[in-house]
Amino acid sequence: MNSRIRTLRNQLLLWVSAPLLALWIISTIIDHDVATAFVNLNYDRELLDTALDLGRNVREANNQLYLDLPQPVIEMLISGEQGRYYYRANGPSGEYITGDPDLPDPPDGAQTDRVSYYDAIYRNEQIRVVGLRVPVRPGSGKGALLIQVAEKTRLRDEFARQILLKMIVPQGILVVLATLTVWFGVGIGLRALTSIRGQIERRSHVDLSPLRSDEAPAEVRPLIGAMNELLSRLSAALTGQQRFIADAAHQLRTPIAALKAQAELALREVSDEKNRATLQQLHAAAEHASRLVSQLLTLARAEPGSHRSVLREPVEISALAREVAMEWVPQALQRGIDLGFDDGSVATTVSADPFLIRELLNNLIDNALNYTPEGGQVTVRIAGGTGVPALEIEDNGPGIPAEERERVFERFYRIPDSRADGCGLGLAIVREIAQGHGARVEVLPGREGRGTLMRVSFVVTR
């Protein structure tokens, strides 16, 4: 699997910068040829001018040819600004007259040309040579002298390199600036996607309303439209699922209630112990089924897409928690459990659905009572010392192992070897309601080192 993260910005940058880099390389090659040709043209002209100057100083005396070179010309040839020139003059018959006698001859194909340029190796260095044929006396028929002037090509190469650098460095800077411009420009252009991401991140999992596309660019609107269509189909599917669960649960409540009533009536009339034991099991099963149906209805109301998932009003959770705890006192006394309430003098208002918060409390208290042995304690507490209002239900029962604290929120999951009665939906309903309200639910060890502390942290309404 490729560990590098592919992003739209990186891909656009690659697609833009790669052609720019290729064009820069091609331009560098062309610039090198242009600079080399320009330098060679100017240096060749200078060589030819030098050869012409020498040709103007050809003299004849006593049928002998020689170059009458003034001292400034000799000094220029020996040590010019660009380095030492090499030169040689040969007579019409090829006889040596003056200069460097070992200077290479012109190639065979240029023996008769008036002006010829060629490259050669001289004294282990690359040189450039011009050969100029100068008539001894025009019209005399005595032939022409061959004047050769040469210089080292490394001077040309250095000059061409300097020209090339002055050409490619600005182009390279332009490529870098263009790449940076594309980088920042793409970032600005992608702000529309960042805005859409912000819309999605700020939503709760229960909000399946369409995304806004009025400020999005035309290229992004089809994507938003496809996402809105997906959200619409998802909302319809969730609504259908919830409707089915709610309808099925409603349809089951009546026959289960009748079965439960008939079992209770039969228990009063039957005296046979064997039949009575069977009826008690039937009554317990009906009770369990009734509880399961009730929890399924609550879960359907708490899930995303339900009409209750968007109902919000200010709720004083301390007063609501006290009220719900009082309702569970009779059952706690029946089981021999001390159920207490501690509000810590914290009055906190949150934006919530009071019906769902009541169901959350009912499930937490019921869960604590089920897992707390006779003679134990269950405390409902409102805590706000951290600045975040929290609802806590603590018991001193056997506790929940650390490896099970996340799995207990799964639907229909029960801790192995658990002897408490239940359907495995209570804590799943708690987490669903908490997430729908933007709250966080945690399973912690009890404050005294035993039991379980269930904490639900809310968002304060300002």
Image (cartoon, rainbow, N blue to C red):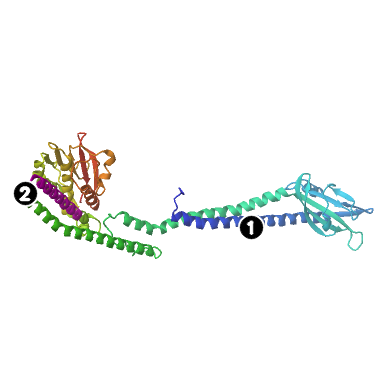
Which numbered disc flags the more N-terminal residue, 2 or 1?
1
Rendered image quadrant of residue 167: bottom right
Residue 202, percent across and down? 30, 54
Residues at badges 2 and 1 in contact (C-beta under 8 Å)?
A: no
Amino acid type shown at disc 2: Val
Seen at 37% across and 59% down, the residue is: 192
Please state the extent of the stretch shown in magenta in the rendering: 272-298
**Along the line of sight, the residue nearer the viewer: 454 or 376:** 376
**Residue 419 tag number:** none
Rendered image quadrant of residue 117: bottom right
Q: Quickly name the residue at label 2.
A: 270
**Along the line of sight, the residue nearer the viewer: 132 or 336:** 336
Distance from the alpha carbon under mark 2 to that under mark 1: 109 Å
Q: Quickly name the residue at label 1.
A: 30
Q: Residue furthest right?
A: 62
Find out whether residue 279 is within the magenta segment: yes
Q: Is residue 226 left or right of residue 273?
A: right
Name the dominant secondary structure of the magenta segment: helix
Circle 2: element type? loop
Seen at 27% across and 39% down, the residue is: 402
